[in-house]
Amino acid sequence: MQKQNHSFVYFFAWLLIGVFLGLSILLFRGDISVVINQAGQPADRQIVKQPPAASSTQNKHSGFAEAVKKAAPAVVSIQTIIWSEASTEESTEEKIIQGFLGKNSPHRPKQKAETGSGSGVIINQNGYILTNYHVISQRDELRVRLSDGKVAKAELIGSDPDTDLAVLKVDLKNLPTLNIADISQLNVGDIVLAIGDPFAIGQTVTQGIISATGRTRVSQNTYENFIQTDAAINPGNSGGALINTNGEIVGINSNIFTSTGNFLGISFAIPIDLAQQVAQQIIQHGYVVRGWLGVEGQELTSQILRTVDLDSMHGILITDVDKNGPGDIAGIKRGDIITRINRQDILSTNDILNMIAAGNPGDEFLIEGIRQRQSFITTATLGQRPLMSR
């Protein structure tokens, strides 16, 4: 009997030890926690069970597949075709054709096609597509291939070489479109994805970050405000979409900084808010209506300031004035320094370009400046900026 009592005591002791160790392990893992009430309250303890921890596979980042699924259907491939007379030279291709059809066969091709490629973004369900002007600037025929493989001929609605943008139209309805990102929320360091058709190999997605915003003087465009990214953009990507991790478009991929012709880690995209404004005007008018002052200028340098005997100054030195243009009529002269427009300081040529372009023909602009070390104020009535050759 005494031996049975000892056995029971041993069993109970080991049971308590097991329970204690089990609770300790659960506490250590965080599966349960002990809540102790504050002083002055009943000193009871509660054991609270924590929700099970997510599995390691759930904790892993799933990538950006959902963003790509949202955006990719609205990104298209563009093929340009230039027709020319078929060559009669004794090339390898010509010898093969002669071998099959004969030298004087009426079935020999009379024209040959030179093709180019690029990308575009569907901006309207009724078939409007936004792309770069340089993608379609030389063409006899345009074809668009959708992400589902469907091919359609495209019509050029209008273009804007000043921003390197163009709008095409295909005769298709109910096309997928992209959600537009709030560009004001875009920050350096944000992850972005570039979608396009590099080298015409098929739709491709690359990843990078926003390296900088507001980049200027990186292209031949008159109006620049580029997003810089290190997402890979190669020939054929131009006109494609730069999207955020929510699948919203933030820009139109445009060009790269390179000495070889291929990607070196610096790419540029046109912000989607600027691209939208241009596209809307092209769809409405066939071109973009901008204000025009009819002057040319350059930013002030220390050498220019010494020449005009000034220590420091912000503004633009006027280097040329179009005869009978709005600036000429307002009395602006070569050598003037424009310091403010509509009471806003002018710090760069980009400032004055964008400010004037944002106006409409007929708008009156208050212009302040310096002429021969004396202040002057004048009012100019904007004209319409002449259209670049299309």
Image (tube, grey):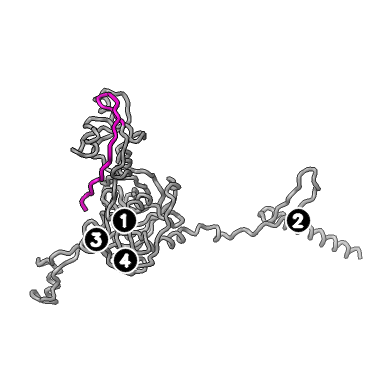
Considering depth in this image, is 264 or 249 the residue closer to the camera? 249
Say which residue label 1 marks: 284
Of 45 and 21, the residue lying toward us: 45
Residue 116 disc label = 3
Amino acid residing under circle 1 = Gln
Residue topped by disc 2: 20
- At label 4, counting other C-alpha atoms closer than 10 Å, the crowd grade (few under 14, some 14-19, many 20 or more) is some
Residue 70 pos. (x, y %): 43, 61
Magenta stretch: dominant SS?
Answer: strand
Specify the amino acid type for callout 3.
Gly
Query: Circle 1 — which element?
Result: helix
Q: Are marks 2 and 1 in contact (CB under 8 Å)?
A: no
Residue range of the region highlighted in magenta in the rendering = 368-390
Disc 2 residue type (three-letter): Phe
Residue denoted by label 4 = 145
Camera-near label (2 vs 1) is: 1
Q: Which element carries disc 2, helix, strand or loop? A: helix
- The CA span between labels 4 and 1 is 25 Å
